[in-house]
Amino acid sequence: MKGMVFTDFATAVEQTWGEDMLDDILDDCGLSGAYTSVGTYDHTQLLALVGALSARTGTPAPALVRTFAHHLLATLHSAHPRFFSRVPDLPTFLGSIETHIHEEVRKLYPESRPPELTVSQTPEGVTLVYRSHRPLADLAHGLIEASLPHFPGDWTVERRPGPDTATTFLVRRQ
């Protein structure tokens, strides 16, 4: 997993709970916290940090991950506004994640394994199927939720766990 996710997670923890909390959860996990945005790290470290934060705050890990996803999307939007501005609507944006954004990630980082997204438009909105070897459907859920305000329309997200590593998100117009 790209280090940018780890550095943004550290920033989110510091902004919400302070530097001491970040130090505490790093200590709890036996991690140094020496992450760089261009480094590559095992996703289990992020899961361990989330688990430690959950234990210290009493907030369920899925809620923490979804909340963090909102922070991460704000960071991505700030760093790459063209990914949002060049598409006319939410369905087009969601479709462009796999066909453009993940494709660019694979070119820049050939060793990376971004999740696989299959997006299809329906009369009600969009069906997005998320598949990954990492158990991070909560992150995908939060990223989808956080993207909604960037596009016209009133949207809802419904999540349906699927078989194996697949999760289906129904993104519907209100």
Image (spheres, grey):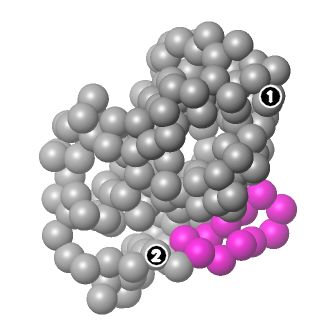
> Mark 2 = which residue?
157
The number of callouts visible is 2
Secondary structure under badge 2?
A: strand
Depth order, front residue of 8/156: 8
Q: Position of residue 89 (x, y in %)?
A: 22, 63
Q: Which residue is mark 1?
A: 29
In the visual, does 126 lie left or right of 118?
Answer: left
Spot occupied by residue 83 in the image (x, y as percentages of width and height): 26, 41
Amino acid on which the number 1 mark rests in the picture: Cys
Q: How many residues crowd mark 1 within 10 Å: few (<14), some (14–19), many (20+)?
A: some
> On the image, which quarter does residue 101 sit in?
top left
- Which quarter of the image is occupied by the N terminus? top right
Give the residue displayed 46% in from the left and 69% down from the top. Answer: 120
171 or 103, which lies in front?
A: 171
Q: Gap between marks 1 and 2, in whole Å?
A: 33 Å
Q: Is residue 160 magenta?
A: yes
